[in-house]
Image (cartoon, rainbow, N blue to C red):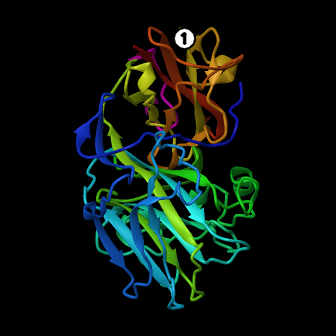
Amino acid sequence: MKLQLQLLVPAVAFGLLASSAAGQSVFINDNFETDTSADYIIASDGTPDGTQSFAYDYVAAGIPLAPNSAPGDTGGLKLTANDTAGSSDAWTLFHLNPITADFYVLSVDVWMNFGSGSGTTEYAEVGVGGDGVTYNSVFLPIEGSGAFIAFTGDGGSASDFRWFRAVPNTPAGETDNTTLPNSHPSYLGHGSNGTGSFFQSLFPAPPSTVAGSPGNIWTTVTIEVDNVNGQISFYFDGQLTFQGDFANDFNGYASLSIADVFSSVSTANNFTLYDNFRVEVPSSTIGSNYCTANANSTGLFGAMGAVGSEFATDNTVTLSASDLPLNSFGFFLTSTSQGFTANPGGSQGNLCLSGAIGRYVGAGQIKNSGTAGVFDLALDLTQTPTPTGLVSVAAGETWNFQAWYRDAVGGSATSNFSDGLSISFQ
């Protein structure tokens, strides 16, 4: 039995300090169908030369409906920058509901509009853990608080995708902070240039106007924040793009930004749209552990956990594996049948599944435990792997899960397993 390599995590979502039917604590839920400007703190770089249009009817402007919008919705948040002055310009909108949670997920639909060619020099930026005062800009000059991801819609930059981590959140022993270099391990080897193979595959043209960048198309940006284990994960359309460690926490204000980092004046066709801005906390621990894991090279026993809802139709389950060796690759397994096989294929662990065992090894689903010894995966219950293909989890079914990960014994490479976790769906 061999472990394979790759990486991912889908999304949950968020709203107004209420609880949904799925047991989520919702901090933010803004579909921008009405003017919600009173819910935001607006910060700029001190040379304001742009606009913020709430409840902007983008459908009337010929832009297709955002992927997470309900039929009949038309509104979004339209941001422009550097409209006339010919200088760098940055705007950040912080939602007034501060987030305080051990684990939370932000998601938002983003459309970056431009006319033709490239060279808008504009970045969309989506952030967490902000201070509500400092505007975000990944370049010239670098400013920000908490963490945010910045990206272009038209390519043409050597740094089309970058992320920012504030100085107070720099882990002990690290020297890189603010805009992290594209050689940083959190870039997962994808780099920052849209010409790279990862981004070319993620945003092919068509439908994108420029291959490797989300120009004139909708993309869903997701940020997972694990304040317990100090790990942040960034996704585009469910594809894990960057994943890094941090110190302290990323509690604070979530933000949406636009930044034009150079002096060229933007045209009326250059703008960024945001829609379906959500932040929520999967607050319910679900499932029951079973089976016995063997100790790994850290002396600990890999442990399974899950948060979310046991209602299959809610489709909000996030698996986690903890107490793993550091910087270890692994992935989750699943089956409707429990079992016990000691040391399968020479592994140091115990396989706690039997029957038709599926592997979460799709694009982005192979994970790395990082410096916290933990990885997680938000499941899509309509795309559950089996040896014969993907199936949907149905009410009344019980599914079992386990993590399989790389380990070493006496300097020799091997593998190990976590314990098992059983979830009965309703």
Quadrant that contains the N terminus: top right
- Foreground residue, 281 or 18? 18
Q: Residue at x 31, y 45 (%)?
A: 15
Asked if residue 180 shows in the view, the reply is no
- Pinpoint residue 21: horizontal percent, then vertical percent: 30, 28
Residue type at numbered disc 1: Thr
As drawn, 291 above or below 70: above
- Foreground residue, 371 or 236? 236
As drawn, 402 above or below 93: above
Q: Residue at x 50, y 83 (%)?
A: 82
- Pinpoint residue 257: horizontal percent, then vertical percent: 44, 68
Q: Residue at x 40, y 42 (%)?
A: 13
Range of residues picked out in magenta: 289-302
Does the magenta run of residues contain 297?
yes
Q: Main secondary structure of the magenta part?
A: loop
Q: Residue at x 25, y 63 (%)?
A: 38
- Foreground residue, 280 or 169? 280
As drawn, 324 above or below 189: above
Quadrant that contains the C terminus: top left
Asked if residue 315 shows in the view, the reply is yes
* Location of mark 1 (residue): 336
Q: Secondary structure at mark 1?
A: loop
Marker count (numbered): 1
> Is 315 on the left-hand or right-hand side of 335?
left
- Foreground residue, 203 or 182? 203
Does the magenta run of residues contain 103?
no
